[in-house]
Amino acid sequence: MMRELYVSIQAELEKIDFEAIWPGFAPIEFILIDDEIICFENGEKPKGSEFFGNTAMYYEGRLVATWNVSDACRADISGLAANIVHEMFHGFQKLEGESRHADEFAIFAYPDNLAAYRIKSAEYRALARAYENADPAALADFIALRRARAEALGDVILDEYKCETTEGLAEYAGLEALRQLSPEKFALRVEKHLGKLKNPGENLFSVRLMTYYSGSILCLVLQKLGIDFLHNLTETRTLFELFANDDPITADFNKYYTDKKSKFDDLLSKPTKIIDKNLLVMGYNPMGMWQMGDQIFAHFICLGKGDETDSKDCEIIQSPMILNINPANNREVISVILESLQ
């Protein structure tokens, strides 16, 4: 029975163009495992203790892909072949010198940060939308959300990126193999992956598991959008870092912040005078005001002693100025810095 299954899977694997999946990718020997025996290319043996999972490993000096065969999966030969291609790709990664391996214990220590998980959920929905609609704007949303989550979490997210790279690329390889064998089964498996991204439930908190779905769908999104992500596996940057190196929001923010700071710096570089006020802001031009700390740069301001609705006896200043404000009441101006014309 196991031998027949092995021969059927081998016949499916022979239909696959491995080079079309990834440059240089080639099949390696595979071994099927059940509770009692292992079945390999040249025979069968009793199962040893070294076989305990689906993986790529060295066995008797040769690199092999292994798969534990359950009764449920025996009926889907093309699906089984695609799963074995996933493990074969892990073997390819070993041969190519892949170094982007996650620290699993760092992933176990992923912070129980509810705000970060909310961002992650939105991030995954954006990624699914990017695939379903071939939408570059949704991919940009995914990138922005992920960057926001990275800022909230810090370096721990790098191990998630690494796992998404190693497992996501292997899962992508399996999906591409399935696409070649059965486009219908490929579409069904992709739909299941998208469902995991859009409605993960408690799986959202299983960081490693979700990288299988996010990494493979990310590859398919990039493929759909014509963004080249195929690379030499000696690369040290993760998949996300490879394609998301351009960040227009950061560039725009840096320009905005530099321009805002220069308004303060330019005025303070000139001879100035400080006028004590201890008055309330009664009127202002909100489109011409910028704040840094407890200072506001403005071009027009109306100051008075009455309440905020009383504009009588208002003192108008119409000139570049810096307002030193009371941090406990940001409408109270303690003093004004003006350019000294003397």
Image: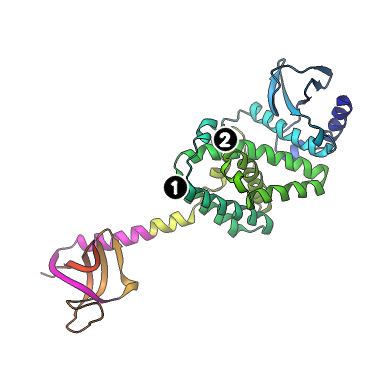
1 or 2: mark nearer the eye: 1
Q: Is residue 88 above or below residue 140?
A: above
Residue 322 percent across, percent down from the top left? 22, 66
CB contact under 8 Å: marks 1 and 2: no
> Label 2 sits on what residue type?
Glu
Question: 46 or 132: nearer the eye?
Answer: 46
Q: Classify mark 2: helix, strand or loop.
A: loop
Identify the image quadrant of the C terminus: bottom left
Residue 188 percent across, percent down from the top left? 77, 49
Q: Classify mark 1: helix, strand or loop.
A: helix
Occupied quadrant, residue 19: top right
Disc 2: CA contacts within 10 A as few (<14), some (14-19) or many (>=20): few
Residue 194 percent across, percent down from the top left? 68, 50
Residue plotted at (48% across, 42% down):
112
Q: Is residue 57 above or below residue 138?
A: above
Q: Is residue 32 above or below residue 315?
A: above
The disc placed on residue 235 is 2
Identify the image quadrant of the N terminus: top right
Residue 62 visible in the picture: yes
The disc placed on residue 244 is none
> Label 1 sits on what residue type?
Ala
Residue plotted at (69% across, 24% down):
52
Residue 337 visible in the picture: no
- Residue range (magenta): 256-284
Occupied quadrant, residue 100: top right
In magenta segment, residue 326: no
Disc 1: CA contacts within 10 A as few (<14), some (14-19) or many (>=20): some
The disc placed on residue 152 is 1
